[in-house]
Each structure stands twice: as C-alpha cells, then as structure tokens.
Amino acid sequence: MTQPTMGGETKGISLHEFNNRIKRLLNDRSVQNCWIIADLSDVAIRGGHCYLELVEKNAAGATIAKVRGIIWAGRVQHLRSKFLAVTGQDLKSGLKVMVEASVNYHEQYGLSVIITDIDPSYTMGDMERLRREILARLQREGVLEMNRQLSVPPMPQRIAVVSAAGAAGYGDFINQLHGNSYGLQFYTCLFQATMQGTNTSPSIIAALDRIASHIDLFDCVVIIRGGGATSDLNSFDDYNLAANVAQFPLPVVVGIGHERDVTVLDYVAAIRVKTPTAAAEWLISRGVEALSRLDRLTSAICDTARQYLNAAAQQLSYYTGNIPFLASSRIENNRIRLSHLLQMIPTATGGRIAAADERLRALGAAVKQAQAQALAKEGLKLKALADKIEILSPQNTLRRGYSITMVNGHAVSDVAELKAADTVTTRLASGTFSATITEINKTHK
C-alpha cells in the first residue's frame, strides 16, 4: 500500500489526532449502554471510584477478552448496595456479572468501559465456580486437609523456595528474610518455576518434584509470587497443582499476589499469607517465637536453679547452726545409753551365768546318762562276742565229735601236707592217740 505524499514527503498525523479518530468511531450507539456478561477481576476502590477488569475465558480457561472498567464514585455505593442485598457479598474478583456499560475512549488513558448498572442475578463467575469444583473434588478424594494437618517445625530455617528467579516478589522475600533485625539465620534454596501463564502449573509441580527428591534437606516449602493483575493468577486455580500441594509431605507456605487475591492453593496449603514479604515475616515470626520460648525456658531454668540454690543455702545454714547442738545432743544421748548399759551389765551377767550353770548341769547329767548307756551297749556287745568265742572254741568243737590231726606239732588242714609213714597225732575231746600213715587218698573237688 503506497503512502500518501505531499510535495514528495510522506503525509502523517499526530497520535492525538489518531486517537481522536478512534474516539469518533466509538461514538456509535451500538457500543453504548450495552449489557455485558463477564468475570470481574482486579477489583479495587480508589478515590471513591471502583476500578476493575472485565474478563472472558474460553472452555480451556484461557483469557480471550479483557477490558478495563470503571464505576464512578456517584454510582459505586448504589451498585454495591444493590449487589450485596441480593447476593450477600460485595463486588470482588472472580464473580461472574452482568453489567450495563458504555465504551469510553480517552486520548491519553486509552479504552475503558463505564459501568452504570449491574444485574445481581449473575453472582458467581467462572473462576469462583471452578475453584469450588476443584476444592469439592479434593474433598471427595480425601486430600484437601492433608498439607494443612502437617506439623510445622517450631523454627523452620531450611527453606525451599518456588518462584521466578528475577521476580520482584522473590527479591522482596529474600531481602526481608535475610535482613531481619533479630539476626536469625535462614538457609534458602530457589527452585525456579514459571509463575504466570499456561505453563505455571506444570512448572511449579516440576519444582515440587525436585524438592521431594531432597526432602530431608528442608523444613518447609514457600511458593511466592508478587502482585499483578488478579486475572494473571488464574493459572493457580488448577486441580493438578492443588492436588500436588495438598499431598506434599512438607508444610507449604503460599504467598501469592495481594491481600485481596485468593486462589485454590490458599485453601490447601498449610500456611496462607498475603504476599512474599508476608511469607518472610511469617518465617521470622516463627523464629522470634522460638527465641521467646527459649528465653522463657532459660529464665525458668535460671529461676529454678536460683530457687534450688537458695533452698540449699538455707538448709546448709540450718545444718551449720544446728551441728553443735546436734553433736552435743547425740553425745549426751549416747552417754545416758552407756550409763544405762553399765547398770544393766551385773544383772545381765548374773542372769547369763545362772543360765549357763543350768545348761552345764543339764549337760553333765546328759553325759552321765549317755556314758551309762554306752557302757551297757558295749557290755552287751562283749558278752555276744564271748558267747561266740565260747561256741567256736576248739574244745567245744571236739565235744561235738570233731578231731584235730597234727604232724610234727602242727595241725593238718590238707592231705597234701602228709606222706606215707608219717606219724600223726589225733586229738579228741577225751584224749589223744598216735598212728602211722600207710595210705593217703585225696578227695577230688
């Protein structure tokens, strides 16, 4: 397309003139007093006026249209009261609304729409409905409260941070945390992630997976993102991201956006704070609380030690003051006891001697009785032996018809001791006789 020229030079118009032409084009009545259906985003009251964004998304959740909106101060209170009376809530980001608006184009500030009325029947927007659906699903699956039920360490110092490296929010967090006035030491490790756009959810999930592989190195996880348009936070209303945070084994601290901003992560994380700076302040406050507890314990230990020392000193003083009295009292008691014992010795000795004499007399009588019994017993044994000797004597044996044969004056007990022609003497009970051996017969056994 050729450019119009004048005198060989390109003809141009000023930006202000160009904007005026746009403004004249937008004076068409078709874009005045139109009822528009959209989601509210980034709602804020400043100077009595209400500034906001009207947002439309497709089925995939991506923003396909967005325009700045203004409710002038003269209409703000009326529309807010009207909306509150019907819906029970104030105008806020995430609500789906139907508003009457007219296009407005300012040469300096650009395009916006002026909202003059609202239909309260449109109360909940797609963003809020999606958030409720995600939370209901997590509740059904039994994981909604899991991260919130984890025990947060009394003083978390080893912090895994999920954020964009060059983000202002991350810088604010680090400066606030490490520059604290209490001298508390924190150890942070950044796990970079995309914090805006369609890649936010998978990027943060990947960062959480990296943290999980080194879970023993950290006390908690902090997910932070600085402020911006509320519509930019839509990517945090994601089921997969919420499910990962809800089931993460370390407590998760979420500091995303501004105080007015709420995402699904705020409902599932163990700790929800307003901003990255507030996340740092929360960690510092835990450290300060731990130091306070330590100070209280230290004071309690010192107080207890002082009490024990004072009690011990009082007891020592008591003992020191009473030792002379106790010693003299003990000596006197022992002297009295010794005197009593000395007085008891003659009586006790006489009694013991009498008892010993009685035992001695009893033992003497017992010895005499035992002696008589032993003599009688031994006498009986001697008589029995005498009787046996008498029975077994040679004379009695001869009387019973036995004889004793002797040769050379010795009694013969075996025929092997004899030989023919020996002269033997045989003794009987009534006398003796001699004979000469003519024959020897041996008995075979």
Image: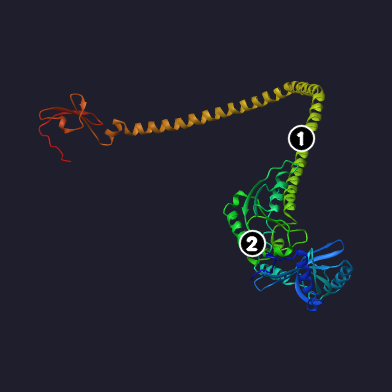
**Is residue 396 in view?**
yes
Relative image position of residue 276 (x, y in whole percent): 72, 53
Would you say the residues marked 1 and 2 are in contact, meaning their CB atoms lie under 8 Å apart?
no
Q: Please, what secondary structure does the residue beneath circle 2 have?
A: helix
State the residue in front, 27 or 316: 27
Quadrant holding the N terminus: bottom right
Residue that badge 2 annotates: 200
Farthest front residue? Answer: 7
The residue at 45%/30% (across/down) is 379
Residue that mark 1 sits on: 305
Where 373 sits versus 207, above or below? above
Could you say where residue 101 lies in the image, as x and y percent from the top left?
81, 74
When the figure is inspected, residue 293 is found, relative to residue 394, above or below; the finding is below
Which amino acid, by three-letter code, is at mark 2?
Answer: Thr
Q: Is residue 121 visible?
A: no
Q: Give the alpha-carbon distance from disc 1 to disc 2, as whole Å.
A: 56 Å
